[in-house]
Image (cartoon, grey):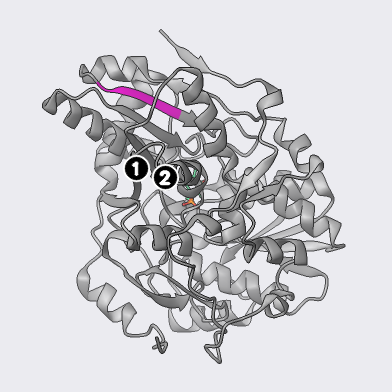
Amino acid sequence: MVTKITLPETELPTHWYNIVPDLPVPPPPVLHPGTHQPVGPDDLAPLFPMDLILQEVSTERFVEIPEEVREVYRLWRPTPLYRAHNLEKLIDGPARIYYKYEGVSPAGSHKPNTAVAQAFYNAKAGVKKLSTETGAGQWGSALSFACALFGLDCEVFMVRSSYDQKPYRKAMIETWGATVHSSPSELTQAGRSILEGDPDTPGSLGIAISEAVEVAATDEDTKYSLGSVLNHVLMHQTVIGEETLKQLALVDETPDVLIGCAGGGSNFAGFSFPFVREKLAGTIDPVIRAVEPAAAPSLTRGSYQFDFGDTVGMTPLVKMHTLGHDFVPDPIHAGGLRYHGMAPLVSLLKQEGIIEAQALNQTDTFRRAVQFARAEGIIPGPEPTHAVASAMMEAERAKQAGEEKVIVFNLSGHGHFDMAAYQEYVGGSLADYEHPEERIAAAMERVPAVAG
Ligand SMILES: *Cc1c(COP(=O)(O)O)cnc(C)c1O
């Protein structure tokens, strides 16, 4: 039995939701990397078009989605919400499990929700080219897709371990017309300095961000684009949660537990922030949980303090849960979750106790993702295996306790380009990495001291 809860196209959201005015405390300022003083919109102008900068600092609760962006969203949105009947049968307990599926976009993940918006605003501002980083290749492919639609050039720095592991993501990026480099590269000052210190580095998102920012900062016609972490990126993703709210209402369900995987925090935020709004307003009271890999445990084991978004220290300082900006995570398959920090807005909600966090090992997440695939058909990307596993564990707990829970999770993308990971799992060679405390402590020593 399949229950697919679809929304008619007329229900496509007209506005993005900005959580900032609903926060219990104001968000901390963003600080200049050199002076440690708060930055203003003008400081960010070399990197982003003004429309996006204004969204980054906006305190407006709802921001209208331009018709040109909604037009592109209609290619795959509204996305389906499924009830996981077969998975429920497998677990054989009283929980009802739903998942929102973002894998139906052209790039196969939630990332085009913001890529399309960012390409639109850059094209509108007359920008010629976007530079960016990509971990697993999902963001690079999403942005190259969006740039192709809006006539922009696109240059992608792809973390070396993924560049070597995921040749088809690279092919996809090139098919949409972008150029892609293995990062660290010889093309930038940042890349050369990292390679000098460690020629065999697997690379990291932090390093790739340094390279992409450098390209944008040194070229008049190029702006920089980030696929996660920033306020405006999280806001663009809220179409996921707004649709899910309506879909649950259609089947008369109230969620008890909401789950998303978290790397930089964008799919988790996009899925959960509209529910956080309802929770803060007192209309519902679900547990809201971000799930991260044990190999990159920023929310569960990092400290909440000011740190750089990149490795070299070119970006502004933001207050977030961090493992230290020069943290190089082990090469787990969930490349999109290998980031040293967490979105400031997600970090603040964790700090305030409004959301919770959990860290899981990849052998556990893949074991359950394979069960999920056999029950439900969809093969999850390595990142959302964390959400799948957490939801299944929650349903097993509900069974033990005899509780009739409604569990809803975000399936942020499919795993069709990540079959090497499943091959390792099925072949029995998938390994786990716990991030050792000494390495966290060593990286944290290099985080700048900021007064206050
Ligand atoms: C990039 C990516 C993630 C991780 O990024 P967030 O900003 O934390 O969402 C998760 N799932 C998929 C499918 C991705 O492509």
Crowding at dot 1, Cα within 10 Å, few <14 / some 14-19 / many 20+, comes out as many
Residue that sits furthest to the left in the current view: 400
Where residue 229 appears, x then y in whole percent? 52, 60
Where residue 234 appears, x then y in whole percent? 56, 53
Above or below: residue 36 compared with residue 144: below
Q: Which residue is mark 2?
A: 383
In magenta stretch: residue 175: no
Residue that sits furthest to the front in the current view: 282
Residue at (27, 31) in percent of width and height: 392
Residue at (33, 46) in percent of width and height: 289
The segment highlighted magenta reads 95-99
Q: Amino acid at mark 1?
A: His
Q: Amino acid at mark 2?
A: Glu
Q: Which quadrant would the N terminus be assigned to in this image?
A: top left
> In the image, is the residue at mark 2 within 8 Å of ligand 1 by its beta carbon?
yes
The answer to which of 302 and 425 lies nearer the viewer is: 302
Q: Is residue 440 left or right of residue 143?
A: left
As measured in the structure, the alpha-carbon distance from the residue carrying label 2 to the one carrying label 1 is: 6 Å
In magenta stretch: residue 96: yes
Where residue 66 appears, x then y in whole percent? 78, 45
Answer whether residue 400 is visible to the viewer in this image. Answer: yes
The answer to which of 125 and 351 lies nearer the viewer is: 351
Mark drawn on residue 287 = none
Residue at (53, 84) in percent of width and height: 193
Q: Are marks 2 and 1 in contact (CB under 8 Å)?
A: yes
Q: Which residue is mark 1?
A: 386
Residue 353, picture quadrant: bottom left
Crowding at dot 2, Cα within 10 Å, few <14 / some 14-19 / many 20+, comes out as many
Answer whether residue 144 is visible to the viewer in this image. Answer: no
